[in-house]
Image (cartoon, helix red, strand yellow):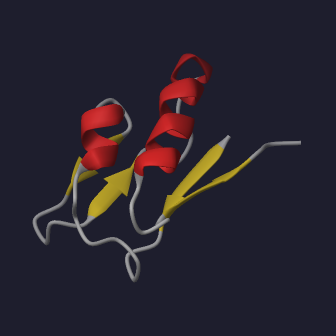
Amino acid sequence: MRVHVDPRLCEGHGLCVETAPAVFTLADDDLATCVERPASDLHAVVRAAVDVCPRGAITITEDP
């Protein structure tokens, strides 16, 4: 799994950080950043973070 946060869409609500703090953080500019390739045991919380993002700023690409 590869995770990406679109900085043009992110408004810094921080719901992703609350949902998956091992993967997401808020940078100094209050926009979310993430671990690009989280461990497999974190995939479920990453998917939950995608679901709670009010702007749809988080995307997941599944590895082949």
- Horizontal side, residue 59 vs residue 31: left or right: right
- Considering every residue shown, the one lying at the far right of the view is 64
Q: How many marks?
A: 0
Front position in the image: 47 or 24: 47
- Considering every residue shown, the one lying at the far top of the view is 41
Residue drawn at x 29%, y 59% is 32
Tell me the quarter of the picture where residue 1 sits.
Answer: top right
Is 37 situated above or below 40?
A: below
- Horizontal side, residue 44 vs residue 5: left or right: right
x and y percentages locating residue 42 in the rendered image: 51, 24
Residue drawn at x 42%, y 69% is 55
Residue drawn at x 46%, y 72% is 6
Tell me the quarter of the picture where residue 12 sits.
Answer: bottom left
x and y percentages locating residue 8 in the rendered image: 39, 83
Is 33 situated above or below 40?
A: below
- Considering every residue shown, the one lying at the far bottom of the view is 8
Residue drawn at x 34%, y 45% is 16
x and y percentages locating residue 37 in the rendered image: 57, 40
Quadrant where the image shows the C terminus:
top right
Is 58 situated above or below 3?
A: below
x and y percentages locating residue 22 in the rendered image: 33, 29
Front position in the image: 30 or 37: 30
